């Protein structure tokens, strides 16, 4: 099986973890508060009424914030991380469809599409003897082949779980509940899952500099 041992994190990746988190979380927070105060935004800025109701206004601002986030990522980090880039493309496509057709289903299905895409890509890559997780996370750490295989399986299943969970929430709860879950539910779940993988990462981590000196 191919491994990601030849992929090393860039200096920007190592030195800007909080910036990367802010760039990913910022658009989501704007989406949440814009939906929460959507009616006030429309009354204060009448031009926004052209987008539709509060959720569509929030979607439009979410798209704008996503574009800004990607631009800042490119300028400051020197590259576009794969996950935010793919997610951003889907946001722009499905967000545009939602506003144009005045159908909120498209933007609500965006997390389902993105998470299912990553889940299938990771598990599908393993089926062909290729672990793609290092590319998805820009190789923030280095693992041996067995470590990459185990971690890829776990993340692949987790992404599919998030896709199913999003479908359950948006199809059975109100817009406000779905938006709140998208920000305050998905993020904590992901953080907890990530921390739960630390024992595996520590067990299978390798030090390229040390290995190179042997």
Image (spheres, rainbow, N blue to C red):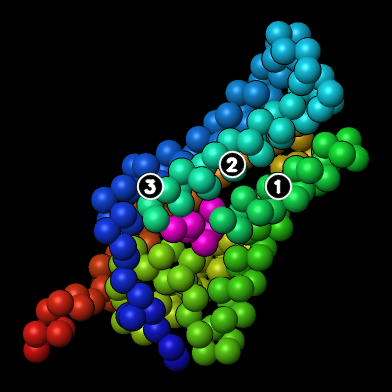
Q: Is residue 81 magenta?
A: yes
In the rendering, which numbered label is found on residue 66?
A: 2
User: Where, quadrant-wise, is the C terminus in this rendering?
Assistant: bottom left
Residue 199: name its quadrant: bottom left
Q: Secondary structure at mark 1?
A: helix
Asked if the residue at tag 2 contacts the one at tag 1, i.e. Cβ–Cβ closer than 8 Å, the answer is yes
Q: Secondary structure at mark 2?
A: helix
Above or below 212: residue 72: above
Disc on the earlier residue, 3 or 1: 3
Percent x, y of residue 194: 41, 56
Residue at point 33%, 81% (across, down): 6
Residue 206, numbered label: none
Is residue 59 shown above or below 52? below
> Can residue 13 be seen from the camera position used here?
yes
Q: Nearer the viewer, residue 25 or 126?
A: 25
Tell me the residue that label 3 is attached to.
Answer: 76
Q: Is residue 117 magenta?
A: no
* Residue 185 seen in the current view: no
Number of labelled discs? 3
Left or right of 206, for residue 137: right
- Neighbour tally class for label 2: few under 14, some 14-19, many 20 plus, Cα within 10 Å: many
Q: Is residue 58 left or right of residue 70?
A: right
Q: What's the magenta region?
A: 79-84
Q: In this rendering, would 2 be left or right of 52?
A: left
Dot 1: within a 10 Å radius of its alpha carbon, few (fewer than 14), some, or many (20 or more) residues?
many
Labels 3 and 2: the sequence-earlier one: 2
Dot 3: what SS?
A: helix
Task: Quickly name the residue at label 1.
Answer: 92
């Amino acid at each position: 099986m191919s491994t990601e041992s030849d992929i090393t994190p860039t200096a920007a990746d190592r030195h800007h973890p909080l910036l990367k988190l802010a760039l990913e979380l910022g658009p989501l927070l704007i989406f949440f508060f814009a939906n929460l105060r959507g009616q006030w935004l429309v009354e204060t800025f009448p031009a926004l009424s052209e987008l539709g109701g509060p959720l569509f206004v929030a979607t439009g601002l979410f798209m704008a914030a996503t574009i800004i986030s990607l631009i800042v990522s490119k300028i400051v980090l020197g590259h576009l991380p794969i996950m935010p880039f793919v997610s951003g493309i889907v946001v722009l496509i499905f967000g545009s469809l939602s506003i144009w057709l005045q159908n909120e289903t498209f933007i609500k299905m965006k997390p389902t599409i993105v998470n299912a895409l990553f889940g299938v890509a990771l598990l599908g890559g393993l089926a062909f003897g290729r672990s793609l997780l290092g590319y998805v996370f820009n190789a923030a750490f280095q693992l041996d082949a067995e470590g990459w295989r185990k971690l890829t399986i776990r993340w692949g299943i987790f992404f599919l779980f998030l896709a199913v969970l999003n479908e359950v929430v948006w199809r059975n709860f109100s817009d406000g509940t779905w938006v709140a879950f998208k920000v305050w539910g998905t993020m904590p779940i992901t953080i907890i899952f990530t921390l739960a993988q630390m024992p595996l990462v520590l067990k299978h981590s390798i030090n390229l500099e040390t290995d190179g000196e042997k």
